[in-house]
Amino acid sequence: MSVPAYEYEGELKAIVDGKAIEALLATPPPGGAALEAILRKARSLKGLSLEEAAAILNLEDAAMLQKVYRAAAEVKERVYGRRIVLFAPLYISNLCSNNCLYCGFRRDNRDLKRKLLSPEEIGKEARALAEQGFQRVLLVAGEGRPGADVDYLCQAVEAVYRYSPLRIVHLNVAPQTVAGFRRLKLAGAGVYQCFQETYHPATYRVMHPTGTKADYGWRLTVMHRAMAAGFGDVGMGPLLGLYNYRFEVLAAISHARSLEQAFGAGPHTMSVPRLRPALGAALTEVPHPLSDTDFRKVIAVYRLALPYVGLVLTTRERPELRDELVDMGVSQISAGSCVSPGGYAEAEDPAAQFEVGDHRSLPTMVTMLLEHGHLPSFCTACYRSGRTGKRFTGLAREGDIQRFCLPNAILSFQEYLVTKAPPELKAAGERAIATALATIDDSNLREETMERLERTRRGEVD
Ligand code: SAM
Ligand code: SF4
């Protein structure tokens, strides 16, 4: 019997069956009645089968697609209400020994200024973000040593907590072993995020010619290792544009289902990174470009198929499209992002990973969300109280997450208004809080939230 090269190697076929997914690509789009039946099921938060997702991905009819988008918006609202969570990435290292053809950090990009932040420098970046009002950050690192090593990554997580008031640190860093993930969890990491980039093995081989990332299976099994190590929350998502987006979305849903089966909880977040131009990348054009309509479909299908997932939209996308998509299923957005190590404290962008599409600041994004009737949230209560993974999914399934999340979101936004928001934002912010409060049905909970709000207004922080 051969010894597995890494933990969960035996799960590969169960995670994604490429042949079965290829076959599903030929699923015809639904007719009117079939679409209504699929959307009815999705509205009842039962998710979609892979066949139903494939059928919707093949829809081209504009009027039918509008129905799909409306259903996605409804599902988001039922699970998450009007809350949209805000976060920022914090790049700690752009050292990389891989050669991903699409990325500015790849090893063979000799023009990139390489940088690995020290714990003190990480603290400075974290304080700069906390100063803006952020409460959660996503640490991002290339896959070069020592920036990808567990020792360095644990120190990086600890540095954020030691040197800044930020409350939760998520990670988008090199895949680790189960033992490595255990240490990261102990250091205080919240969500572990890693993108498969492409689920199509032949495309994967071309895009990742050398380095540890060249091993498709090592990467595909990473979520299993992270969850086995105690990460209740993991984040995933293919990099859209490398291969047929329909294949990628179906494979990602299949990946999510395999986690549900193995661990009783699916991914905490699904991201929709779409390929951007990057200085020093080897790719000069997008191999499988997605139109904005394709992109809308991707978001809607994820929302309908995986109703409880946090859908993350980053600053890779243009402002107009981001403004539209926050009304259509997205539940988390980044803002004011800098995609190079040291970029926040230094106010320069010497070593970016790719071109950012939306440069708007945090207050501008908060204003936009308020204008759209959303409640901007800086909440981190779930991670700190252990309402993650299976517990979170269980609560969400019963629609109860609103009970916990809405009051906490209101309080976190109030704290932002009191401590960080520019004065011109305050009136609109207070109106949004009043509206959100009125939607808390339970009068005891409403009163308790009002009391806590009063304390926050007086300057008491959580
Ligand atoms: N180095 C680690 C890795 O590859 O997983 C984590 C950090 S990497 C900087 C984060 C993600 O950025 C990658 O997983 C990839 O999906 C995305 N990315 C890389 N190049 C990109 C580009 N040109 N446009 C958009 N996203 C890109
Ligand atoms: Fe390195 Fe990650 Fe960029 Fe690939 S995507 S070159 S692994 S930083």
Image (cartoon, rainbow, N blue to C red):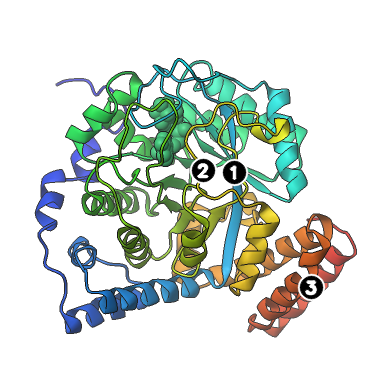
Q: Residue at x 56, y 56 (%)?
A: 387
Q: Quadrant of the N terminus?
A: top left
Name the residue beneath numbered marker 2.
356
Instruction: Name the amino acid type tagged 1.
Output: Ser
Which residue is tagged 1?
Answer: 337
Residue at the right extreme of this rendering: 458
Which amino acid lies under the numbered mark 2 shown in the image of this protein? Val
Q: How many angstroms separate mark 1 from mark 2 (CA)?
A: 8 Å
- Crowd tier of the residue under label 1, counting other residues whose Cα lies within 10 Å: few below 14, some 14–19, many 20 or above: many
- In terms of image quarters, where does ligand 1 lie? top left
Which of these two is toward me, 160 or 71?
71
Q: Is mark 2 within 8 Å of ligand 1?
A: no
Which badge, 1 or 2, comes first in the chain's sequence? 1
Residue 258: give x, y in percent of width and height. Answer: 28, 49
Asked if residue 208 is positioned above or below residue 450 in the image, the reply reads above
Viewer-proximal residue, 192 or 349? 349
Q: On the image, numbered disc 3 is attached to which residue? A: 427
Rendered residue at 74%/73% (across/down): 428
Q: Inspect the image, locate mark 3, and give the three-letter code of the amino acid beneath it.
A: Ala
Residue 97 picture quarter? top left
Q: Measured along the vertical axis of the image, is residue 108 above or below residue 183?
A: above
Q: CA distance from mark 3 to mark 1?
A: 26 Å
Query: Of all residues shown, which one is farthest toward the front?
Result: 284
Q: Are marks 1 and 2 in contact (CB under 8 Å)?
A: yes
Coordinates of residue 358 in the picture (x, y in percent): 54, 50
Q: Is residue 419 visible?
A: yes
